[in-house]
Amino acid sequence: MFNSVKRPIALAVAGVFLLSACATNPDGSFKLDERATGALIGAAAGCAIGAAAKGSQGCLAGAVIGATAGFLIAWYFESKKIADAGQVNSEYENQVKAQAKTKGKSKGKEAQIEAVVPKNDVIPAKFESKVQTAAPDASGQKEVQITANTDLVGYGDKVPEVHQKYAIYDENNKLVEEKSEKLTAVDGAGRYETNSKFKLPADAKGKNYTVKTALVSNGKTYKENAYKVSLLDGQMQFATLY
């Protein structure tokens, strides 16, 4: 009887949180982000601890606390291609030509172009990101949004495996959460945009966090950017570190 009571309670409480943790993919399908995983694990653990002390009432209280704890950091991520290979490769080739013309060094121009836009490979050429406040979610809670643009150049046939890494550190430089997302939109050279959103911990008010994001191509880090994020007087403040 005990198990038959606590299981539905934990699932019901987690279900409430799952409704807001369900994200829509760009293709129209749905997925559960880490908020869902945290809610399920937290609710089950909280229910078990609470039930051991106070039965079904303890299960309910523990499940609510546990599910909420699983929401300390919530992620959403998407990637999309915004410019094709022909456009991006041409842009970089023209840049090299313009620089060579300005410096009066037309000799060896083809070698210079290949060094920037390789014929047999696809490599990162630029990674830029910015941090801003996203529009409040359905519950009115503000989110931090990281938007990044990545340029991949080259004429190689092999598509690189590109990931964007995220890490959040507290005021004591202790790792709070980290995440690695694959840019599934990558199909070769081109310009790609990624968007990620997350919520600060419930006790974030008045605290400073360091947010880092890095581009990794075929297992090698190309570039890392870092920001300071603070929540003061209900307003989020951002500062670029590097």
Image: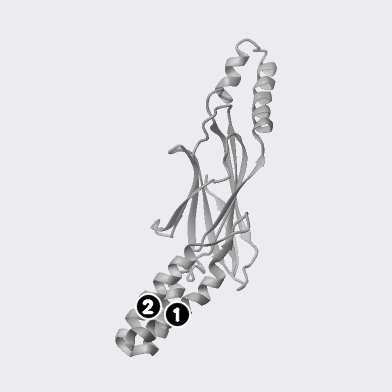
The quadrant in which residue 154 appears is: top right
* On-image quarter of the N terminus: bottom left
Measured from the top left, where is residue 109 in percent x and y?
A: 62, 15
Q: Position of residue 5 (x, y in %)?
A: 38, 86
Judging by the rendered image, the residue that carries numbered circle 1 is 64
In this view, the residue farthest toward the left is 52
Residue position marked by numbered label 2 in the rendering: 46
Using a 10 Å C-alpha cutoff, classify the residue at mark 2 as few (fewer than 14 neighbours), some (14 to 19) or many (20 or more).
Answer: many
- Hey, what amino acid is under mark 2? Gly
Residue nearest the viewer, comparing 139 with 205: 139
Q: Is residue 223 left or right of residue 151?
A: left
Do tag 2 and tag 1 residues touch (Cβ < 8 Å)?
A: yes
Vertical side of 148 occupied by 34: above or below: below
Residue 32 image offset from top left, x and y in percent: 51, 63
User: For the residue marked with disc 1, what is the amino acid?
Assistant: Val
When the figure is inspected, residue 44 is found, relative to residue 92, above or below; the finding is below
How many marks the image carries: the answer is 2
In the picture, measured across the screen, residue 94 lies left or right of residue 150, that is: right
Residue drawn at x 57%, y 35% is 188
Using a 10 Å C-alpha cutoff, classify the residue at mark 1 as few (fewer than 14 neighbours), some (14 to 19) or many (20 or more).
many
**8 or 19: which is nearer to us?**
8
